[in-house]
Image: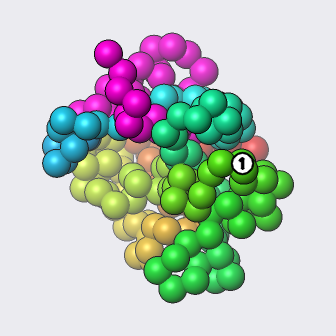
């Protein structure tokens, strides 16, 4: 039974298939199992596209639900939208996507991830190398903060690293995105 204070997280990602969305929800559930939130875990709703996530979040907020929005920042967050330790995610999303903050939402209800999800692969380069195996080139690993890396730099580094790998699924998807 759902409780009134349950938190619903409307997240960008999970693709368009029910199977991928289910896998994303499972991954978040396993992540939250490793935190102190065991008795009151947020419920992650994989929405697919960022616009779907925003629209679903907006509807939940309008219905009075305890909801959060979790989307990629897509571009660097400007200094004007980072006031000390207080971030202004809705100001960033207004500039980036022309999204207006829902009337019943606050800055605390919106959370921005890195510019592009694939940035997280750069954090654990050794695991990525193990996954791709023979042919993976470890030398193009970027050294700057992943929060500051633009999409093309992330995709370029991954493309260079996987170019000679036998498993080319990531290379193909990166090449497709860059077109």
Badge 1 local density, few (<14 within 10 Å), some, or many (20+)? some
Can see residue 134?
no
At which x and y percent is residue 50? 66, 40
Which stretch did the figure color magenta?
1-30
Q: In the figure, residue 63 lies in which quadrant?
A: top right
Residue 102 x %, y %: 71, 48
Question: How many tags in the picture?
Answer: 1
Q: Quadrant of residue 77?
A: bottom right
Position of residue 156 measured from the top left corner of the image (x, y, whole percent): 57, 58
Residue at image location 60% in from the left, 58% down from the top? 106
The residue closer to the viewer here, 1 or 139, is: 1
Residue appearing at x 35%, y 27% in the figure? 3
**Vertical arrangement, residue 116 with respect to residue 176, above or below:** below
Q: Does the magenta stretch include residue 4?
A: yes
Q: Which residue is drawn at 58% across and 35% down?
A: 64
Residue matched to label 1: 102
């Amino acid at each position: 039974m759902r409780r009134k204070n349950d938190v619903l997280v409307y997240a960008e990602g999970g693709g368009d298939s029910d199977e991928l969305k289910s896998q994303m929800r499972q991954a978040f559930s396993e992540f939250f199992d490793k935190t102190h939130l065991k008795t009151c875990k947020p419920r992650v709703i994989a929405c697919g596209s960022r616009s779907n996530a925003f629209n679903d979040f907006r509807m939940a907020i309008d219905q009075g639900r305890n909801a959060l929005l979790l989307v990629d920042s897509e571009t660097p967050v400007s200094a004007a939208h980072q006031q000390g330790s207080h971030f202004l995610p809705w100001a960033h999303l207004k500039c980036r996507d022309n999204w207006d903050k829902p009337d019943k939402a606050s800055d605390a209800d919106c959370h921005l991830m890195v510019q592009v999800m694939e940035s997280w692969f750069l954090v654990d380069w050794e695991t990525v190398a193990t996954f791709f195996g023979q042919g993976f080139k470890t030398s193009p690993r970027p050294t700057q903060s992943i929060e500051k890396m633009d999409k093309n730099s992330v995709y370029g580094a991954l493309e260079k690293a996987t170019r000679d790998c036998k498993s080319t699924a990531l290379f193909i998807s990166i090449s497709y995105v860059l077109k």
